[in-house]
Every structure is written in structure tokens, then in C-alpha cells.
Amino acid sequence: MRLSNTITTITGGGSDGWDLFIKARKMISQGHDITELTIGEHDIKTDTRILEAMHAAALGGATGYAMVPGIDALRHAVAQRLEERTGTATTPDNVLITAGGQAALFAAFRAALDEGDTALYINPYYATYPGTIRSVGGRPQAVVAEADNGFLPSYEALDAAATAAAARGAPAKALLINSPNNPTGAVYPRDTLAAIAAVAVKHDLIVISDEVYDTQVWEGEHLSIRALEGMAERCFVVGSMSKSHAMTGSRVGWLVGPEAAMGHVLNLLTNTNYGVAGFTQEAALFALGLGSAFEADIAAPFQRRRALAQKALEGQNAIRLSKPSGAMYLMLDIRATGLSGDAFADKLLMERAIAVMPGESFGSAAAGHVRIAMTIPDAPFEAAIKEIAAFSAALV
Amino acid sequence: MRLSNTITTITGGGSDGWDLFIKARKMISQGHDITELTIGEHDIKTDTRILEAMHAAALGGATGYAMVPGIDALRHAVAQRLEERTGTATTPDNVLITAGGQAALFAAFRAALDEGDTALYINPYYATYPGTIRSVGGRPQAVVAEADNGFLPSYEALDAAATAAAARGAPAKALLINSPNNPTGAVYPRDTLAAIAAVAVKHDLIVISDEVYDTQVWEGEHLSIRALEGMAERCFVVGSMSKSHAMTGSRVGWLVGPEAAMGHVLNLLTNTNYGVAGFTQEAALFALGLGSAFEADIAAPFQRRRALAQKALEGQNAIRLSKPSGAMYLMLDIRATGLSGDAFADKLLMERAIAVMPGESFGSAAAGHVRIAMTIPDAPFEAAIKEIAAFSAALV
């Protein structure tokens, strides 16, 4: 079978960065007792009330084709919530419901890129970003956000990357950002967003803003770049029920953008998924109706564990917490141990039975770091952090 | 916002063929009493037992990220079912679960095409086919299957189209077929499939075989082109729970293909949907477990209504049933009335309050026809057919 060049190069030829994760999962399946701090999935399940609402909707007949743009009530609720949270006028016509945030991300890149176009994204990055760009035939171009600058991208680095892409004859058409950030926990402040906006205007880029962690902010506040002057017309915002409502497996997300663009995106959604299950949309609608108190409850464990980790790491200097302003992860700077993130994570797994993600899994800019998902209950989480601290102290 | 050429040309600049449908829906929303025979959706809802299985799975914890390839048990069940139905060796490694048949179709075209490559498909065709090809940057090239040849494609027409595409410098890489066929009801016999296979081998095409109506065959038998000698290695088969199990809204389907290709397709699925909801997969697994008797029950109403229509149309010569061998539609040849399908459907809607799809909605080869979905209960269905017969008789 003679496959397309596009599909055979989605991984870019490299590892997908999940070797450590797969190794840990294999050890678990062989009966080893491993503490897993690898993936971004809540240690709680989806709330039973939400599941009951889903079941009621299904029994009530929401089992046929749903409207491809999404059910009206959910589009309305998403628009209203976004408007309230960001202060930017948003109507249901700006909103399309997608099969999770990943489907929204894919749609945004398809909307922005033709084959051969460059898309900029920030290194470190979430695992699927370069592959999503390649899936539409685009060229992913990472822009380093330095660890020593709090993993915030700079105007200069972004501008240089866009200029270089144009010089290569593959001009950049899109720029993907993610705040609150996975894996670094960075929450982009206003001046960083302003710098990004300036680059976008200068190079006529579509900004794709992945804001799926917008309810998980521990310091500062979540700002959407779409709220900046003039940016609503050049932004797509990716949102999802996954992280905010512990509904990762339900695959309900959305893309928000200019109304004129959304008609074209709808054409794509017709040809990719032909809509999202009506009963999961009804579940999402019910969940949004639980309001911000529910969202705060879902986020609370991560804030609590972050404080536990900060306390547990006090008074040692082998590892350093990169300022974790948001999201459900901690990025630990382990450069003082002299090990790479890969080597540290492997040694930690083999010697202490704790699985963390090597920073290198998220790009070169996170080398010398490991990412810890705060996704196990408080007591074992605290014990694991102390174990990691002791393990690290013995290395320096 | 400067959108990609790919996304802005998905519709090919034409109507999407659903104008009549939208007009009818509008009239209904305004309070008109319209008999709708337009879309391919069962008049029953998803079976309550399946919904209870889904709910049990959700309450049981299937609410987190499911494995992106699909849950093992479902991949196994799909493989086994396909092997039993087609006699072709199939393992779970040949199967990936997708968000409905449409997502499988999209993945197949992404696997086959780079930007600018041609994909052949048969005219008449299901509405999303050309848009799906354009969504990956491909060039859709329709190949006419003549009404007077039972809407079966010929070797000569397919070979000529592939040759012409190569001459244009945009060689064909894929050929999409659909049997049992929507909209025509044609079930491709072995010699037609053999001719298609011969063209595929000659021009090194990937065959994408949409077999979502494989449980709805009224004459002859369903044959999968994948079962033909040497074809398993150049075929993708698209399947779905939608039509066979009345689960249209659940969005569970699959793509079946050579194991070596499926690893690449999995990379795409990771970057498009990041998996399918675990609880809907569990529902599908339960539904498949209901066995072929359940599938026959779901298909039975269409076979019954087809017989009702045949009887109701006896002894008149204004309209002619194109041999409806399978699927949930009837294609009526209305050329004797002197009207186009568009004009006939519009007049029928306005004068008799019955909505059917103009053949032209499915391509030029279905001009002078209308498609009737057999998706309302028997009594009003029979009455509508009689009404259409009387309406047509008055035109000739």
C-alpha cells in the first residue's frame, strides 16, 4: 500500500517522547508497584451527576445525528462562559463543538495551513502539537521559551522564527500558544501575550490559543489572547470539558473564532466527524450548568498538591520547582543533579519505582527537567515528592 | 483572518445539495405538516439495552482517556465480525476505532492522499465524499455510474478517469466505492468488484470501501472488495455502528486495513480526536454482542417498506424504482415526468407536503431521480408512496 507522505511523516521520524511512560506501564502490567506521575488525567472519575444527565438525555432520545455545529444550548453556554471569563463578545456563531480539544486543535490548523506552510509553536510543548501540524501537511517550527525565563516566549525569538520561515519560502501562517501551559505550568502574563499579538500582527499569523487549563490558575490570572485589542479577528481558541470538569474521556471540546471563519470550519467538521454525540453534549451542558464552584472543586486538588510539593521541597537544593503558576503539573529543574531528564526519570523509575515524564519528552527547552503530574491522592503524592527529593539529594 | 485555501474550498464552491432538505426543515419549524423522507436515520432510537450498557460502563469508570486505537475488546469484536462476514483474515491489529464512519473515511483519505493528488469516487455519491477528499487537499474526480446500468461503475470509465488524472499531472491515488450504495441502493456484484480491483491494481490505487450498509441487503449478498484476491493489502474498509445498530448519534465506527498502514493511521487519530469515548465503545461492544438477529431486526423495516413501495408502484408508469438491492433508500426514476429531480422534489414538497431528496443532490448521474429514505413508519410511508405515485401520474 502506497501511503501518503503526509501520514507517514506525522511523527517527524523521532520518538514520540512516551518511551518512559510505556516502560512504566509495562512494568505495572508485569505486577510492579509503580507510583505513576506521568499523565494529565484526574484521579477522580467524571461526576456521577453528569453521567446521570448523559443517561437521561440518551434515554430521552438524544441518540440520533446531532446538529454538526453542536447543539444550540451548548454553543450558547460555551459562548456565554467565554464572554464572562474573558470579557470578549462571543456568540454561539463563534462556537463550534468538537470531539474534544484535540479535534478543535486539528480543525484550527486545517483552517490556517495549506501543505508546506509553517506553523510556529512554543518549546516545551504538549506531545501532539508538532504531529497535529504535520497531519495537515504543515511544517512545525518550534520556538524556544527558556527555562531561565520562566518558560515564557519572547518577541525576539518569535519574530526571528517567523522571519526565518518566510526566508525559507515556507511562510508561517499560524502560531500556537498554550497558557496555562502543559508541561511547564507557566501562565502567560499580559506583556507576554502582547508580544505574541505584536508578532502575529506583524507576520499576519493566525493565533491558535489552547486554553484547556483555563480553570487551573494558582498565581496571577488566566488571560485569553483573544481579549487583546484586535485579536478576536485573528484568533482561534481551543477549549474542552476534559480538564475543567474531569471529563477527559467524553471527548467534548470546542473551537471559538471569528464568525466568518466558522462556516468554513463547519465544512471541515462535517467531513471529519459529522458531529459529536448528542448525549455527551447534553452531559457537557449539564456540567457547565454546575457553575464555577464545581470547576473550583475539580481544580482544588492540584492547588493543594502544589502546596504540598512546595513544602516538601523546602530546604534542599538538588531540585528546583519552576514557578508553577497553573495547570496540573510541576516542572522540576533537576540540572543540579548532572543528569538529563531522560536519565533522571529512568533512574527514578528503576531505583524508586516512581514514574515521571522526562522534560525532553516535551522538547529540548525542557531538557534537564522532569514533569510531575499531580494526579494521585495527596498522601502518596506527598510521599513521592519527598522520595524524589531524597533521591535527588543523593545525586548531588 | 487569512484562511487556508484547503479549508475555504471544501465545498468546491457549489451547493452542498441539501437546499431541499433545509427548505423542508424550515417549513416544519414554521408549523407545516411535512412528511420527511430525506435523511438516512432510523425512525427508532438506539435500543435501551445498549444505552443501559453505556451507562453501566460510564458509572463503572470508563470516563477517562480510552486507548487511542480503541479498546481491545471492541477491536477484537470488529475484527472477528468482519472475518466471519467476509472470510478474510482480520486481527485487532487491522482495526482502529474511529469517531463514526465519517472519521474513518477522513483518515483513509489522509492516509492515501497528499495535497494535489486525485481521488476517484463514483457518481452518484453520498454528500460528504468530495468534501472529505478536499479536506485533505485532494482533488475529487467523479466517475459516472449510469442509471441505465443499475448505477454500477464500469472498468472502462474508471480506467479512463485514472488515466486522465495521470495525464493532468495529478495522479489518482485512491478510489472510493460504497456498496450497498447510498443513494442508489445498488449492491455491487462480484464482476463489478473484480473490475474495480483490476483498475486499482493497474493504477496502483488504494481502494477505500465504505461498507456501512453491509447489513442492509435485500437482493444478492454483500461482498467486500477486501475479500478479493490480493485486495486486503490495498484496501481500507470503513465500517460503523450507525446504520447496522441504529446508533447514528453515538459516533462509533472503524477503519480496517493492512497492519503496516494502521500504525500510521493511529498517528493521525492521535492528532485528530485522541480516541473515542470509552463508554460509547463499551456500548458498541455490547451492541455487537447482541448478534446478527439484532442486526436483522434493525434492518427489517427497510426491507418491509421496500416491498410496500414495490407494491404501491405496480401498474403505473410515471415513475420507476431503480433496482433497490440494499440500503435504506429507494431511488425513483422520474424522467418520464419530464421534470428534473430538483423540480420534482420542490413541486412535491410545495403541492403534497412530502420531502424527498433530488437525485441531483448526489451528483449528475442521479439527475432525473429522487431519493426516498424509508425512515418513517410503514403506514405513513405507504401512504406517501401512493401519494407520490398519484402526483407523478398527473404529470405525464
Image: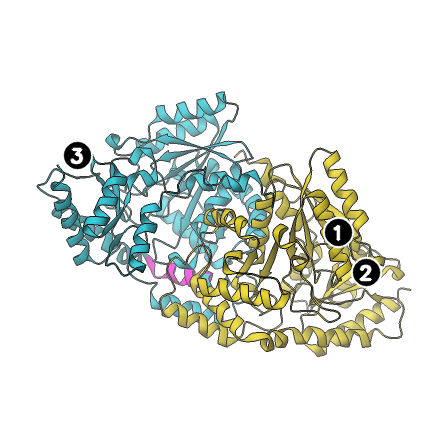
Chain colours: A yellow, B cyan
The spot of residue A137 in percent (x, y) is 61, 40
Please identify, in this view, whether the residue under mark 2 or under mark 1 is nearer the observer.
2
Q: Which mark is residue A150?
A: 2
Pinpoint the chain carrying mark 1: A
Neighbour class for label 2 at 10 Å: few (<14), some, many (≥20)?
Answer: some
Q: Position of A307 compared to B35: left or right?
A: right
Residue A362, how many percent across, how many down? 73, 54
Q: Is residue B136 above or below residue B84?
A: above
In the visual, does B325 lie left or right of A264? left
Can residue B53 be seen by looking at this rendering?
A: yes
Magenta stretch, residue numbers: B281-291
Prevailing secondary structure of the magenta residues: helix
Is B287 covered by the magenta stretch?
yes
Residue B331 appears in view: no
Amino acid carrying label 2: it is: Gly
A297 relative to A205, above or below? below
Could you tell me which secondary element the residue under label 1 belongs to?
loop
